[in-house]
Every structure is written in C-alpha cells, then in structure tokens.
Image (cartoon, grey):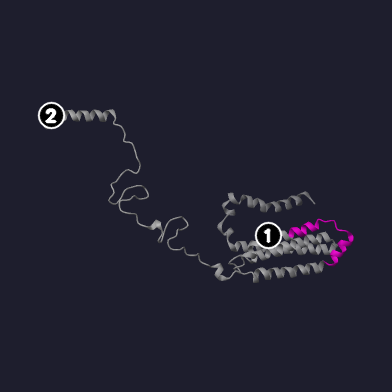
Amino acid sequence: MPRGQLLGWAGVLLLGPLLLAAAPFASWLNMPWLHSPLFHFLIGLLAAVAGVGLALLVLHVARRARDGRVFLVGLAFLAMASIFFTHAVATPNILISGRNLAATYSAMFSLWLGSAFFALSGLNLSAQANARLMRAARWIVLLFFVFWLLYNWLFLVVLVEPPAAQNQPAAAAPAGGRDDYGAGYGNSEAATPAPAGGRDDYGAGYGSAPAEPAHDMAMPAETGITASASELLGRSRPWVVA
C-alpha cells in the first residue's frame, strides 16, 4: 500500500477518537442537541446500516475466496451491526417507547456476540474444516437472521413496559413524614409549635421569656479611658447635687 494511502486511512481511523477527545474543550463539539434522543437514534441507525453494508461486503469476499476465517470476520461485523440496529430503534420516545431493556442491553450484547465471532476467526482452520464451514455458509447466515428476528420479537414486542409503569407518578409521602431534605411536614413533631417562652432554632428568645444571649460571653474589661471617665463622673456628682 502506498504511504500516502496508508496515512489517509490512519487519519480516517483517528478522526473519531480525536473529535471525542476534543469535545470537552470545544463548545461546537459538545452542543446540547448532540445529547438528544433524536441524535442518538440517527447516529446509531447510520452506524448500524454502515456496519451491515461492510458485513455483506466481507461475506461476499469470503464466499468468492472460499475462506472460512474471512467468513467469520463478516459474521462478526454482521452480528454487531444488526444487534446495534435494535439498540438504535429502541431509543425512547423516537419510534417506540417502553423498550428500555432492548436499548440498555443490545449495545453490550452486540459487542459480546461480535467478539465471539472475531475470536473464532483467529483459529487455524484445517482445509477440511474450512471446506465444511464454507459449504454451510449460507445456512449459517440464514440461521443468524432467524435468530436476529427472534431477538427483535422478544425485546421489541414481548418485553415491553406498560404505559402505567413508564408514566407512574412518584408515591405521595405519608402525613407527618419528612421530605427528601429531612424537613418536617404534616403532623410530624417538627411541625408542632414551640411553647411560649421558648427559643427558636438560632437560640433567640421569644414569647414571655426574657431575652438572654444565646452563648455565655464574658463581658469585656473596662479599658483605662473608660475607668478614668467613671471615676471623674463619681467625683463631680456631689458638686452637681449641691
């Protein structure tokens, strides 16, 4: 492969990771609509369709070359792309709702299933095993599509959350309980009025009780200037009275 073509493919492969790494630092790469369910559906659908196209191309090459290991690589791409298609379709509130189980587990299952076929493609197949595998290639692909249809029927049709479970309101708290922040309400003891002459939460007196300082604070000692003024006032008092 020419060096320029090799660098071009390397740049294409590195484009996605580089954009992902730059997203926290570039506002135009981290816009709110990129996190919306619609964008999740579109990007997942496009990735699944591209993966299926790549898988069919690899399977066609494997059939022409009669290579069982290449056939297993094509099955790996087909498994990942087809199950990931289910993950994209199950995006909540786009095409359907209540398929949270399919949306949650299909992405992980696509990787597990694809990795199993990739691991099998690394085995050294004998000529007889390769010939048997390629003779059964069409049946294997057909069985996989049957499995994929059953998988979608199970997760998209059978395992559906009812509307009541999707829109179930939060349970009302009992009277006299406490809210999420620990504040009392209803008939709880926190709502009971304090007796007259008590103190509030900050230690200040109210009602008929005499107001006292909340903390025992020592009175500051008289400074020299204050003491001299008091002494002078005491000496001058008899003259004022006379």
Residue 32 versus residue 112: which sits nearer the camera?
112
**Which residue in the structure is indicated by mark 1?**
108
> Mark 1 or 2, which is nearer the eye?
2
Q: Give, as a three-letter code, the residue at label 1.
A: Met
Gap in Å between the C-alphas at discs 1 and 2? 101 Å
Is 103 situated left or right of 116 in this image? left
Residue 12 versus residue 36: which sits nearer the camera?
36
Q: Main secondary structure of the magenta part?
A: helix
Find residue 229 and report its horizontal and vertical position in percent.
Answer: 23, 29
Q: Secondary structure at mark 1?
A: helix
Q: Quadrant of the C terminus?
A: top left
Find residue 196 and report its horizontal and vertical position in percent.
Answer: 30, 53
**Which residue in the structure is indicated by mark 2?**
239
Residue 54 is covered by the magenta coloring: no
- For the record, the magenta segment spans 114-136
Instruction: Answer few, some or many: residues within 10 Å of disc 2's Cα (few below 14, many 20 plus, some between 14 and 19).
Output: few
Find residue 106 and report its horizontal and vertical position in percent.
Answer: 67, 63
Image quarter for residue 160?
A: bottom right
Image quarter for residue 156?
A: bottom right
Q: Give, as a three-letter code, the residue at label 2.
A: Trp
Instruction: Answer few, some or many: residues within 10 Å of disc 1's Cα (few below 14, many 20 plus, some between 14 and 19).
Output: some
- Rendered image: mark on residue 71: none
